Amino acid sequence: MASALPLIGLLLAHAAAPVRAEEDISIPVLVPVTGFLSLEGTSQRNGALLALKDAVPGLTIRSDVIDTGTSPEAAVTALERAAGGGGVVAVGASMLGTQMLAMLPLAEEYGLPLVTVSGTASITEQGNPWVFRFFPGDAVTKEAHARYVVEELGKRRAAVIYQTTAYGQSGKAHLDTVLKRLGAEPVFAEGVDPTAKDLLPVLTKALAAGPDVLILHLHSGPTALFLRQAAAQGLTIPVVAGSAMHQPSTAALLEPAELKGVCAETAASPVSGGSPEMEAFTEAYRREFKAEPDAFALGQYDGTRMVLEAVKAGARTPQAVRDALAGGTHKGLAMTYRSDGKGNMAHSAVIVCYDGASRVPKLAKRYDNVTGVVP
Amino acid sequence: MIILQLLVNGVALGAAYALVALGFVLVLNATSAVNFAQGDLVMAGGLLAVAAAPLLPLPGVLLLPVVMALMAGLGVLLALAAYMPLRRRPPVSVFISTIAVGIILQNGASVLFGPEPRAAPPLFSGGSLSLGGLVVAEQSLAIIAVAGLLIAAQGWLFARTQLGRRLRATAQDPEMARACGVPVTAMILATFALGTAYAGVAGLLLANQFFVAPTAGGDLILKAYIAVTIGGWGSVPGAVAGALVIALFEVGVSSVLSYPVALGALYVTLLLILVARPQGLFGEAARRRA
């Protein structure tokens, strides 16, 4: 009797398990929808879910969303949980760099492709073949940022104000490199804590250095705070901000007049339109989530669509999806994506500018295929 | 002129931190409870103002009593859920329960309002006053004025009114106060209501000037805690002085040195104060710090 127990248990478990269609696959979305990165994480989640909606006719695709919060442990637990669900061919993974670094070894162990929009440079420098980043890293965006300042605006005396976080320091390091190469070393640079409430001191010191342009690389709230204080002080030199400025939620904090003369680098600006497909995406996003899409949403959307294209083409295993991502080219809404061999898929950036009359920026300059990876 | 500009900004920022610390000190004085949810209550007040603004198209100054009343109700709920059941337990129980309330408020706000930062309506108008090259945001002046008013009101309440005397009696010895006929439970609820209403005021005022997001509370409670520690545990003038010291470093010192160095200097100063005068600048040596 004792020897029959495992068999009975197995039969009962089999009977109790839900019947899964042969073509049932899963693309879990593990992103930070709470904590300090919840704004960007929510965009990421929304982009993935929009891409998965009515994704492949005749195929059921499950997409459980798990909140990774802000700790690496929570992200690893979420990945373990998602991997145990069965049928997983790829994972929409957190944009928080520390969480990605924690998840990478596990993804390699499980053999699961991670599709992310994390900007942390080191996630694609671990030699891990399972990570795919659908958002341009600082090597691309800061190239566009600095080149726009020097080549288009003709400015050579930049004051750089950046965040003291990993995000800010990485961006500042890349800006320094490109500005130096372009012969326009900054006349002033200072880091600011994200919790700083009054940015007049750093603005005062920056202006005292006699710059002809202000370069910002700050998070959303500090960017708006800085621009409001700069406008109140009657700032007359141009400001070219980091990607946080392109987010509609950042612009919503300011009056259009406070945005006059402000530009920003970003991977894409869906609200600025540019093509019928982009406008359709923006409309669908607004309808679905009652919010404005940003570049993070679009990047995750494009990445997830590339996974779905692979599935449509017959990929049914994580390995097959990984191979398609690693070797394929995908024409997304923001840009054309192709891996550089390390999982960096995005190689373009744009500069958008505000005209002072509207909170919707206009495309000022495209920097396509900055790395030369896309044929 | 720029020094004067920085001075005005520093005082406004100090007043903002003092507003946050005020509700914290009030609850601390009346119940000996360290309310770690105070920063998140300020955030909740700010988001409440953001949500109420389109429903009640009133100037901020008229919206303020509405926010205060709703927040007072939230304060009563906070007391009933996180303080009353644990009031006879070790103080750490209330620390934990208020931290839990803070997390619930933070995640609840994220679900209800979304994660993006928002701006509440200004108290009067969102403009700036230009006085001979000095640019002062009207909201900054409003923050300074409201903080001054509330600090004076709190001093008057505790020193000059029967309610204040009952609140102080409850804080000093609840059992003796009860024996003397003070309705201790009602006093505790009133304290939480008042402290949370103050958080609502701070939230409305700060959310216009510095924006508000669901994650804003953590930094605010840290600043309030430092202000109260510098100033003296439970001292209202001390909390104000502590808040101004923080602003001095964040605005004054950072205008000479860099912001990270200014923050470092603030924490070194805090340590020196704790070594030289553990009870804080205005505190009594006998008070116990959490």
Image (cartoon, grey):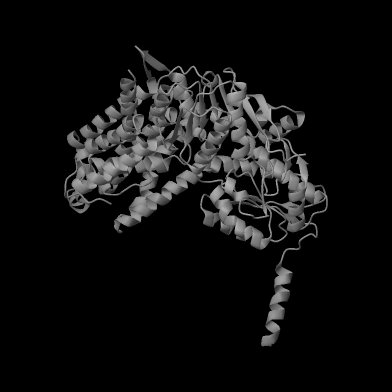
Can residue B126 be seen by looking at this rendering?
Answer: no
User: Which residue shows up at 47% across the image and 44% down it?
Assistant: B106
Q: Quadrant of the N terminus of chain B?
A: top left
Instruction: Say if B204 sits above or below A343 in the image.
Output: above
User: Which residue shows up at 40% across the image and 38% down it?
Assistant: B42
User: Which residue shows up at 77% across the image and 45% down it?
Assistant: A55
Residue B238 percent across, percent down from the top left: 23, 38
Q: Nearer the viewer, residue B9 or A253?
A: B9
Label count reads 0
Can residue B201 be seen by looking at this rendering?
Answer: yes
Instruction: Say if B92 sits above or below A117 in the image.
Output: below
Q: Nearer the viewer, residue A225 or A28?
A: A225
Looking at this rendering, what residue extends furthest in the top direction? B132
A312 vs A342, left or right, is: right
Residue A206 percent across, percent down from the top left: 43, 26
A351 vs A22, left or right, is: left
Residue B105 percent across, percent down from the top left: 46, 44
Residue B279 percent across, percent down from the top left: 20, 46
A323 vs B11, left or right, is: right
